[in-house]
């Protein structure tokens, strides 16, 4: 097998709202090495100031990819353990928030965009600046239908790509319960064939997406959508071979297992919108429970925030009962909350990429040490562990049994996560969930 690398293609810069000032090229370079991420999205490529910062600090290093300029690497790499030092490349990426009306309804859809060069991004920015304000935020809000954004993107450069972002998030996504659509084709119309991948988001995983027929032909990708560089790689994608822009995208188009190693995901229960609920009343419900209550909060009577799992069940019922379920009945899926459908039969499965779950290393260390993942105690233990064992993702996913055994309790915790021996409490209504090792 060719050498592998991890890619996290949806991130944000310090020009996006509610982000860390450390979301700089240097900060991303530093944390990418600690996490074991070989290709990082630039994020926010449509923001003029960030775009200028990127062009001033990055240099083309591989086909369609960039690297931090050599003169900046020593300072940015301070504090990175020697065992983690490795090349880091950047793909030119951004995110557009489309808020517009179609069919008499207000639609709110987020899209990740990928471009093969700074030159292409510059041409796109010139056109977007004529449509709306791209200065206000790293993720600009434009009254631009995603179908038309895709058309404009392909006119700018045929090698550019659009990936619908976190497609289940209730308020801002392609399939979201609040303002999305019921299918990929309904959103993108005649340009749907140009959509070759969708982003699962933090509150869903591959098995949930496999239940929806309109997603059968596309690849699933998973990214961190980080607002702090310490969260880089919490969701990511694995690729094989020499890193390049075209290799990654063409591999996803073909769902080629020789190029694409699949996704790395948090357990979806950790996401903020996995289950239904009402945070103000501390009410968390499964889809079955919500449906029995007409989707109203049992404490105050107000409408519940419908979570991602509920929306998956809803669309699955709308499309009928012939969707593919990895050969399992709904009750056999790894989400015990999933209500059974009245009828079920398995169809031939479409080609699919692998998926693996992680619990981030700071969370595992926090459970071992009895403190918060952001505590100084965890930070010290984290750095020491990386110095001993190398970067986080390879340790969590690829370290052999002998290596893990030598690490004692934290090695045992990593093995338990791999085996699924965890307790999961689903997030709801903007409240993160929790996953604990048994």
Image: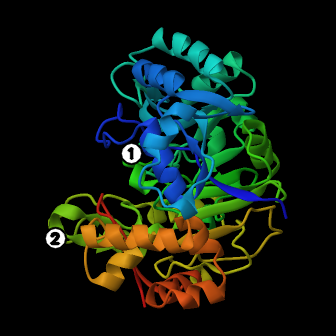
- Percent x, y for residue 62? 73, 35
Tag 1: Cα neighbours inside 10 Å, few (<14), some, or many (≥20)?
some
Residue on which the image places disc 1 = 171
Q: Can residue 188 be seen in this view?
A: yes
Q: Do the residues labelled 2 and 1 touch (CB within 8 Å)?
A: no
The answer to whether 94 appears left or right of 140 in the picture is: right
Q: In this view, does 248 lie above or below 72?
A: below
- Percent x, y for residue 394? 61, 68
What kind of element bears circle 2? loop
Tag 2: Cα neighbours inside 10 Å, few (<14), some, or many (≥20)?
few
Quadrant (top left, top right, bottom left, bottom right) of the C terminus: bottom left
- Percent x, y for residue 326? 72, 74
Q: Is residue 415 above or below residue 190?
A: below
Q: In this view, does 235 lie above or below 91?
A: below
Q: Which of 409 and 256 is in front in this view?
A: 409
What kind of element bears circle 1? loop
* Residue at 46% in and 56% down: 80
Q: Nearer the viewer, residue 8 or 410?
A: 410
First along the sequence among labels 2 and 1: 1
Q: Quadrant of residue 432?
A: bottom left
Q: Is residue 58 above or below residue 176?
A: above
- Percent x, y for residue 437? 43, 85
Residue on which the image places disc 2 = 299
Q: How far apart are marks 2 and 1 (CA)?
A: 23 Å
Identify the coloring.
Answer: rainbow
* Residue at 33% in and 69% down: 380
The answer to whether 336 appears left or right of 398 in the picture is: left
The numbered mark at residue 387 is none
Number of marks in picture: 2
């Amino acid at each position: 097998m060719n050498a592998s690398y991890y890619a996290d293609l949806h991130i944000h810069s310090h020009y996006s709202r509610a982000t860390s000032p450390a979301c700089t090229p240097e900060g991303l370079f530093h944390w990418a090495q600690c996490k074991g991420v070989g290709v990082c999205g630039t994020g926010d490529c449509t923001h003029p100031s960030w775009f200028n910062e990127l062009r001033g600090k990055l240099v083309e290093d591989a086909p369609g990819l960039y690297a931090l300029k050599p003169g900046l690497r020593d300072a940015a790499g301070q504090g990175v353990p020697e065992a983690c030092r490795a090349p880091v490349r950047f793909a030119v990426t951004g995110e557009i928030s489309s808020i517009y009306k179609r069919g008499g309804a207000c639609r709110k859809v987020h899209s990740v965009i990928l471009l093969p060069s700074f030159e292409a991004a510059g041409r796109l920015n010139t056109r977007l600046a004529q449509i709306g304000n791209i200065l206000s935020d790293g993720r600009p809000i434009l009254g631009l239908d995603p179908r038309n954004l895709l058309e404009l993107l392909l006119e700018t450069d045929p090698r550019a790509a659009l990936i619908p972002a976190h497609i289940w998030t209730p308020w801002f996504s392609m399939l979201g319960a609040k303002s999305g659509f019921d299918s990929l084709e309904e959103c993108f119309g005649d340009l749907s064939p140009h959509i070759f991948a969708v982003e699962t988001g933090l509150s869903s995983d591959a098995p949930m997406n496999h239940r929806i027929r309109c997603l059968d032909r596309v690849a699933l990708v998973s990214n961190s959508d980080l607002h702090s560089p310490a969260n880089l790689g919490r969701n990511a994608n694995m690729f094989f071979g020499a890193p390049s822009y075209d290799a990654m995208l063409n591999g996803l188009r073909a769902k080629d297992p020789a190029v694409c190693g699949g996704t790395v995901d948090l357990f979806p229960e950790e996401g903020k919108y996995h289950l239904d609920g009402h945070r103000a009343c501390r009410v968390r419900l499964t889809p079955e429970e919500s449906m029995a209550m007409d989707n109203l909060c049992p404490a105050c009577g107000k409408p519940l925030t419908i979570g991602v799992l509920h929306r998956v069940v809803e669309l699955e019922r709308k499309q009928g009962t012939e969707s593919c379920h990895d050969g399992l009945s709904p009750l056999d899926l790894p989400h015990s909350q999933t209500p059974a459908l009245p009828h079920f039969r398995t169809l031939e499965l479409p080609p699919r990429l692998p998926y693996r779950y992680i619990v981030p290393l700071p969370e595992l260390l926090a459970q071992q040490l009895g403190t918060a993942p952001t505590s100084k105690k965890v930070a010290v233990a984290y750095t020491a562990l990386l110095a001993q064992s190398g970067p986080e993702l390879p340790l969590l996913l690829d370290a052999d049994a002998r290596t893990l055994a030598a690490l004692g309790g934290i090695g045992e915790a990593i093995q338990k996560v791999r085996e699924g021996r965890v307790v999961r409490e689903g997030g709801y209504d903007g409240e993160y969930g929790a996953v604990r090792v048994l």
